[in-house]
Image (spheres, rainbow, N blue to C red):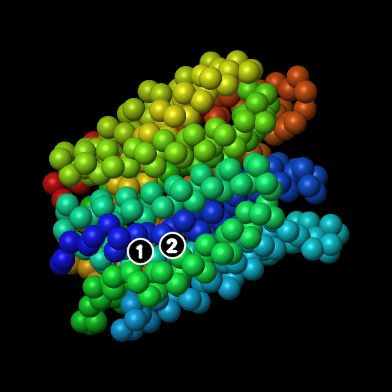
Amino acid sequence: MPRHSLTTLLYYGLFGLPLALVALPIYVYVPQFYAERFGLSLSLIGATLLAARVLDAFIDPALGWWIDQRKTGTGYARFIVLALPPLLLGFIALFHPLPIAQAYPLHWFLSTLLLVYFGFSLATIAYQSWGAALTHEPLQRARVTATREACGLIGVIVAAGVSAGFGMTWLSAIFGVTLIAGAALLLHKAPPASISFSPSSEAKTGWLLPFRHGRFRWLFAVFIVNGIAAAIPATLFLFFVKDQLRLAQYAGLFLMLYFAAAAASMPLWVRLAQGMGEARAWLLAMLLAAAVFIWTWCLPAGAAASFGLICLLSGATLGADLALPSALLAAVIARAGHSGQHEGAYFGAWNWATKMNLALAAGISLPLLERLGYVPGVPANDTHALIWAYAVVPCLLKLVAAAILWRAPLRSI
């Protein structure tokens, strides 16, 4: 396969920017938005998020199988087009509820959440499958995923800055414009995916196909545990900054610093992956992340500089979490002989894992914190449970994920 230029990769990668614009508010701002706007309890929000994400997660493998079976000479383009209306309308409805939502806030929350989840799932699976089919060369895999994730990080930074400084109305407008523009570049300028139409008897197994291969099962286990380690702080970030650090006014700045560090670190992790392999580089990043993030456990109220430094250093390790797992997955697909045929099945399962991580983080941590006596936004609130959930548990899970990755047969692919 030809080596793609940076310009060519950007035509593909820029669609990741609007996807990140929608992802950050949904995964970080939604719990606080509906708790404060409609007075919904943390237990109810956590249960709703868990139900919606579980339902959405189990749709993803079916979407991946459907994409594999229905892609034509246009590759994944038609699925991107189908995903745009529910994605855009669902996001706007979620953060700009109509007056009827005041009477039925939970129903509105759940229905709009499911709508935006469906559009996001369809777009993401097709988009990631497209990227995995662009190249099978070991030295190029990380370039493709790093370009896509770097554009996504720019979107996250924009989302954090705009939502904090200008509000959700401006963010929704920017999301709509960049979604249409990014889709146009992807559909008309990006390199075509390498699609194979040769029949495969394995296709009959549908979404179970990836789990027939040992390397995928190992990678999937690492991705699940590491993903939960990342999802818990993401879910609790605003509560920790507001109630423990008492620095709510700097929440957007902390997020921007964190994701800017991740974007800046991406070339370093790509270079390390090319020199020592994707698995070893990812393992190094996990250990560094645990060593840095554990210090949030002892931060007192007002520790803006210390938390900012932790955001900077832990953000640098996030670059590996974003660039390397998908590159490893592309390698696993190639080693299984499924390149150009079954990427949809693999990324359907991959996105199932991503959403289950977020579902478990919200569905378990929020109700548990409430049962332990934590009440968000209450002055002089006891935050001991919040500190342990935000700082200690994710670090322990990171170490478990690192141990699994060390044992996994992934360093030779």
Look at mark 2 in the image and give the residue it sits on.
Answer: 15
Looking at the rendered image, the quarter that the N terminus falls into is bottom left
Say which element carries label 2.
Answer: loop
Instruction: Kindly tell me whether residue 108 is visible in this rendering.
Output: yes
Q: Position of residue 401 (x, y in %)?
A: 34, 37
Residue at coordinates 39% horizontally, 69% vertically from top-left?
186
| Vertical side of 47 occupied by 390: above or below | above
Query: What amino acid type should be assigned to the residue bearing mark 1?
Result: Tyr
Q: Residues within 10 Å of mark 2 (few under 14, many from 20)?
A: many
Look at mark 1 in the image and give the residue it sits on.
Answer: 12
Query: What amino acid type should be assigned to the residue bearing mark 2?
Result: Phe
| Residue 75 left/right relative to 135 | right
| Residue 93 left/right relative to 117 | right
Look at the numbered discs 1 and 2 and tell me whether their residues touch, using CB distance below 8 Å. yes
| Vertical side of 290 occupied by 59: above or below | below
Instruction: Kindly tell me whether residue 209 is visible in this rendering.
Output: no
Q: Quadrant of residue 345?
A: bottom left
| Vertical side of 402 occupied by 392: above or below | above
Residue at coordinates 69% horizontally, 48% vertically from top-left?
167
Q: Residues within 10 Å of mark 1 (few under 14, many from 20)?
A: many
Q: Position of residue 145 (x, y in %)?
A: 31, 54
